[in-house]
Image (cartoon, rainbow, N blue to C red):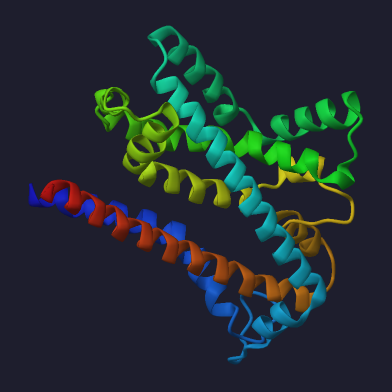
Amino acid sequence: MKKKAFWGILILALALLLIYAPILILAAYSFTDATSIGFHGSFSLQNYITLFTTPELKDMIIGTLILALAVALISTVLGSLGAIGAFYSRNRSRFILGTVNQIPVVNADVVTGFSVCILLVVVFGMSKDSFIPLLAGQVALCAPFVYLSVLPKLSQMDPSIYEAALDLGASPATALWKVVIPVIRPGILSGFAMAVTLSLDDYFVATYTKPATFDTISTYVVNATRGAQTSVKTALWALSTLLFVVVLLLVLIGQRGGKKQERKEAEA
C-alpha cells in the first residue's frame, strides 16, 4: 500500500513539475535583463517598468481587462439564468438544453470565432469596430462554462425551497433572489472567474471578431513574438508572471471561501 502511495505521489509531482516549471522559469527570467530565455542575465526590474510605462502595453492590458469583465458579467447572467431554467424544466427540456449547451464547450474555438464573424459581420453587416462581434463571440464561448458551473450547485439544492418560498407569499423574483441565488452563489462566482479566464485566454474568437486597431493580450502576444522589439517581448514575461500570480491568488481566495461556506453549512 505504501509503495502504491509512493508511486502515486511521484507521478503527481512529475506532472506538476511539467506544468509549473515553464511558468516558474518564465517568472524568474522576468526579473532579469536577459534578452532571451536560456541566456544569463543580472537582476533587473526593467521588464516591469517597461510593462507599466509603455502606452501601447498599458492600453492593451486595460482594454483586455475591461473586455474580460464585460464578457464575464454578461456570460454569468446568461449562464446562470440558463442553468436555473434548465433545472426547473422537465427532464426532456433539461436534456435538450444540456445538449445544446455542450456543443460550444466541445466545439473548436476557431469554429466558434469564424461562425460568429460570418453571422454578424457578413450576414448582418455589423462593423467589427462596434466591438459587438467580439463581445458576442466571447460570450458564446464563456456562457456555456458558467452554465456548467452553476448547474451542479442547483443539483445539490433542495428544489422544494423555491416552492416553499412561494407558498409563504414571496413573489417568483423575490424567491429567486433571496432563496435560490444565495445557495448557488459559489457556482456563480466560480463561473464568473472561469469566464474572465477564458476571455483573457481567448485567441481564435478575438482574431476573427476584434477591430483592426484593438488587441487583446493573446493576440498582442502572438503578434509581438513575430516582431523584433526585444524590450516588448521581455516585458510580456512580466505580464505573464503577474497574470499567474493574480490567478493563483484568486484560486486560493476561492478555495478559502468555499471551505468557510462548507463550514457554515455544516454548523447550520
Q: Is residue 41 above or below residue 1?
A: below
**Residue at coordinates 18% horizontally, 47% vertically from top-left?**
265
**Residue at coordinates 55% horizontally, 30% vertically from top-left?**
105
Residue 46: quarter of image? bottom right
How far from the left and from the top, in percent, is residue 129?
88, 47
Q: Is 239 on the left or on the right of 135, as rendered?
A: left
Q: Is 105 on the left or on the right of 177, as rendered?
A: right
How far from the left and from the top, in percent, is residue 40?
61, 85
How far from the left and from the top, in percent, is residue 181?
38, 39
Q: Is residue 3 above or below residue 250?
A: above
Q: Residue furthest left?
A: 1
Task: Say which of 165 and 57 sits in front.
Answer: 165
Task: Say which of 92 and 236 sits in front.
Answer: 92
Q: Residue furthest front?
A: 169
Q: Is 188 on the left or on the right of 106, as rendered?
A: left
Task: Say which of 44 and 86 sits in front.
Answer: 86
Residue 156: quarter of image? top left
Q: How many marks?
A: 0
Q: Residue furthest top?
A: 92
How far from the left and from the top, in percent, is residue 255?
32, 56
**Residue at coordinates 81% horizontally, 33% vertically from top-left?**
117
Task: Say which of 106 and 52 sits in front.
Answer: 52
Q: Is residue 254 above or below residue 89?
A: below
**Residue at coordinates 46% horizontally, 23% vertically from top-left?**
85
